[in-house]
Amino acid sequence: MPLLIKNGRIITESDDYVADVYCHDETVTRIEPGIDPKGLPMASAPLEVIDATGKYVLPGAIDPHVHIHLPFMGTHAIDDYESASKAALAGGTTMLIEMICPGPGDQPFDAFELWRSKAEGLAAVDYTFHMSVVRFEEKVRPQFTKIVQAGVSSFKVFLAYKGALDLSDEHLFAALETARGLGVIVTAHCENAEAVDAMQRRLLAAGRTGPEWHGPSRPPLVEAAGVHHLCAFAQLTGAHVYTVHTSCDEAVREALGARHRGVNVWIEVVTPHLVLDESYAERPDFEGAKYVMSPPLRHKSNQRVLWNGLKSRAISTIGTDHAPFRYAEQKVMGRADFTKIPNGIPTIQERLDLVHTYGVRTGRIDLRTMVDACAAQPARLFGLYPRKGTVRIGGDADLVVYDPAYRGTFSHAASHSKVDYNAYEGWERHGRAEIVTVRGQVQARDGEFVGTLGRGRFLEREATHGD
Ligand code: URP
Ligand code: ZN
Ligand code: ZN
């Protein structure tokens, strides 16, 4: 059914104005003040009219860093495309980019097909993937070309997780060279795997086994060393790179220093690092395990650096790194040894509201920067713009009618993820995605799913990071 959103304050990455938005056949077809429903084509046909007076009309948010199907640390992330889509939509996210993370023995193309099969027929948001490269010897390289031809124009590499996902320097160099040739951007988890491994062993040998030791086993220098290493290889190969979940001053400085030297590097931050600090992982009685992720939560002083980087747009995107593991059955696997706690702080539902409450309302960033980091930049960097990521005529009608006056709290009771806790339980919340549309169809209202599972589409993307 066509949709007319009246009198909303439209916020894009660059504009802020009041107008009506008319959507037909999955796209935005008119944006102007005072659109008269009687003057629309087929005026007698059913039309959904939404009064957005006093509300924001935002482009559907895009989460550039999500894990749904994830075999990891001896277990599996527990969401599926049903729970993850519902959670995403409830929080105003209409498209996500999931990481395909095969094991070292898996065939890359098989992994691509497996991950795609998990989404097909179930996703209620549009989706695409970053293809992880966990080995890159000669014989698997043609498979990556095939994956890029199938529309996946970004790779992922891990410099961390020794013996599991980490890539050797030989393979990293070759992967970056190939990516450059294909015009593919390489996203990277930057922590030095060897240093982490050695420090973990040292801590465990000293009897330091609790979740509070996760952070000390991978301090800022370990992440900065990873960013430096990635950027050096990017400089040598000419590849375009993107540092995921960049958590601290030291790592941001490394990336900006490399950019200053001419390296094409972009920076992502994720919501947990913007609002949580290391004290959460130090909570007693193993409660800290809920807050174990990598890179770890940092000293609070880093948050100012991350928000300021967003404000100046030196930092491009805000993702979530949604990596959902239940506390009761999964986080407890590491009760006697912090290195066995599955890493991840699920946040796919809370991202926009956390950024609005703790970023926009506090004056750390403005609304346009929120839209830029949560929608426009993920679309631009990953070959989706201007179809996605903004509000414009001809773009997909992925829209959020956002009520900035809503007051509530974050809670597990309201969350759609299958995780058994909410890392932000009881926190004050200002704002809510009241209506969320995916290609013109209302998929969520007031935090509840009202749409169609399986409506989400795999979007093929062009490789745009060539010379
Ligand atoms: O702690 C995290 N980040 N878990 C998910 C895997 C990753 O490194 O992104
Ligand atoms: Zn990571
Ligand atoms: Zn991740």
Image (tube, rainbow, N blue to C red):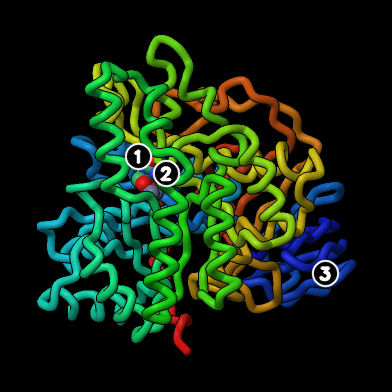
Q: Nearer the viewer, mark 1 or mark 3?
A: 1
Task: Give the spatial CA distance, label 3 vs label 2.
Answer: 39 Å
Q: Is residue 225 left or right of residue 361?
A: left
The three-letter amino acid code for the residue at tag 3 is Lys
Task: Give the spatial CA distance, label 1 vs label 2.
Answer: 6 Å
Q: Is residue 460 visible?
A: no
Which residue sits at x=28%, y=26%? 330
Which residue sits at x=64%, y=48%? 306
Q: For the residue labelled by badge 2, is the local secondary structure a helix, a strand or a loop?
A: helix
Mark 1 and mark 3 lie on one chain; the one further toward the N terminus is 3
The residue labelled by disc 1 is: 79
Q: Residues within 10 Å of mark 3 (few under 14, many from 20)?
A: few
Q: Is residue 350 above or below residue 132?
A: above
The residue labelled by disc 2 is: 84
Task: Give the spatial CA distance, label 1 vs label 3.
Answer: 44 Å
Mark 1 and mark 2 lie on one chain; the one further toward the N terminus is 1
The three-letter amino acid code for the residue at tag 1 is Asp
Name the quadrant containing residue 209. top left
Which residue sits at x=44%, y=61%? 228
Q: Could you tell me if the residues under marks 1 and 2 are in contact, i.e. CB atoms within 8 Å? A: yes
The residue labelled by disc 3 is: 38
User: Quick one: 214 or 4, which is closer to the camera?
Assistant: 214
